[in-house]
Amino acid sequence: MPQRPPARASVLEMILLGVTVFVPTLAQGAILRRPRMVRLAARFDTNRSANRTLARLRRRHGPGPVSVNVLGRRVLLLLSPQDARHMFTATPASFTPANREKAGGLRHFEPDGVLICPTEVRPERRAFNEAILDWGAPAHRLFPALTPRVREEAQALLALHHGSGRPLDWDAFSAAFWRVIRRVVLGDAARDDHRITELLAALRADANWLNLLRPKNRTREAFLAGVRAYVDRAEPDSLAALVAATPSNKATEPAGQIPHWLFAYDAAAIATYSALALLANHPEHAARVHTEIDGTEPDRPATADALPLLRACVLESLRLWPTSLAILRDTTAETTWHDGTTTPAGTGVVFYSSFFHRDARHLPYADEFEPDAWLDGRNQENWTLAPFSHGPAKCPGQDLVLFTAATFLAALLRDHRALLLLPRRPLAPPAPLPHTIDHTTLRFALPPK
């Protein structure tokens, strides 16, 4: 049987995709959010428009992937759960996470990271990441030591909020969460090392331009030298100390894995802050969360199975408003898709997260806040949901991130309740949940409960 290529988007469809999908996605910042662009995207709910465009593409061409021409490169847009599952499960055998565009961005600050490394060294670097992050273990070995640090920073944020008399805003929340990130990844000595965060932010801002800008070598080397210094210091009960103590070979580039953890953890801050907004506008779930928190001992270290509902709320925040706007792959071999179409090696593949996460055709609660779906098994084998990616390349830091986010929220909400002051439009029924949210303009009050 002769090979059949995927359907191709027409010129008019390409224009519509450019206006509603590609331009808004790139404008918001794939690597570091641009606040003004995020604000504009939320105002016009650009993710909703993008999702409508992709749904229109599916109605016209069917559920198979659609081929589009992006600046001369042939790229596939996935539209079905079956093709999403194929992409995730066949990574890295037939799909490389080191997608050309992704590599162009991430090389600015994590040139040795596992996501963009050559195929021949990926197994060693992936195994090293899994070893440090305790992937597959019942609980990360550092949970007992990290719990008081996370709670301490949440208490400091509460004290700042109540002492200032001003609403809790994103700047204050982000600064507090970054103190947590630095302490978890680099150690307590990095708590107030704002320079290393600023260097990373500068590099990530350039990374938003993907392949269009060359890396700033001096800035990158200053950042990486700072990371290596913390590994050399190897402060106990930090990921940096585990990096220093874990056997590795030269190909692993141990310290070179840390920049990605810092980068990925920043997305967790956005998801945690957005989850706070959801709880503020869903009192029935907030009441259950308070019951869950009250059932834990305030001075006891968090465990792997602690705070399941809070963790589910963070996952639901990531489903409703993905921090990874798209998951990218490149094919490494000829690939046959669910509809029988075939594409050659070197084809770019796009899983547009918001489209799949909010697809009412495959998700009855697409536009609702439904954290229980992460607890009762409904989301377990749903390949349209990938808040931490899926399959063999799934983020090995998922449990550590959810532990941090849930522990931080629990410390904020143990004796307080969250009131959403801005936006005034409620993020709850009967108003439909927006597909795009501007986390930078959310404002809260945290009065005693």
Image: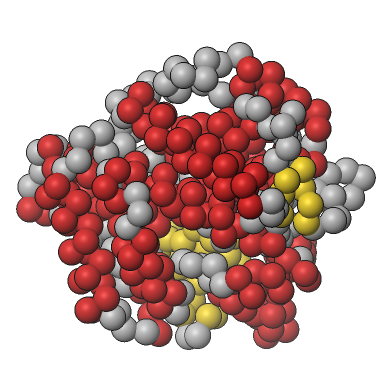
Measured as percent of width and height from the top left, residue 281 is found at: 80, 41
Q: Residue 14 at x, y = what percent?
A: 66, 80
Is residue 342 visible in the rendered image? The answer is: no
Vertical placement of residue 79 versus 187, above or below: below
Asked if 68 appears above or below 54 in the picture, the reply is below
Q: Position of residue 181 (x, y in %)?
A: 39, 47
Q: Nearer the viewer, residue 386 or 417?
A: 417
The quadrant of the picture occupied by the C terminus is top right
| Frontmost residue, 267 versus 367 | 267
* Residue 126, above or below 61: above
Q: Residue at x 79, y 52 (%)?
A: 421
Q: Residue furthest left?
A: 250
Find residue 304 and report its horizontal and vertical position in percent.
44, 22
> In the shown orientation, is residue 297 left or right of residue 363?
left
Is residue 415 something that shows in the picture?
Answer: yes
Residue at image point 52% right, 15% down: 297
Across the whole image, how many numbered discs are drawn on residues?
0
Q: Residue at x 16, y 56 (%)?
A: 229
Q: How is the image coloured?
A: secondary structure
Q: Residue furthest right?
A: 430
Q: Does 426 sit above or below residue 282?
A: below
Which residue is rendered at x = 45% and y = 23% of the image? 302
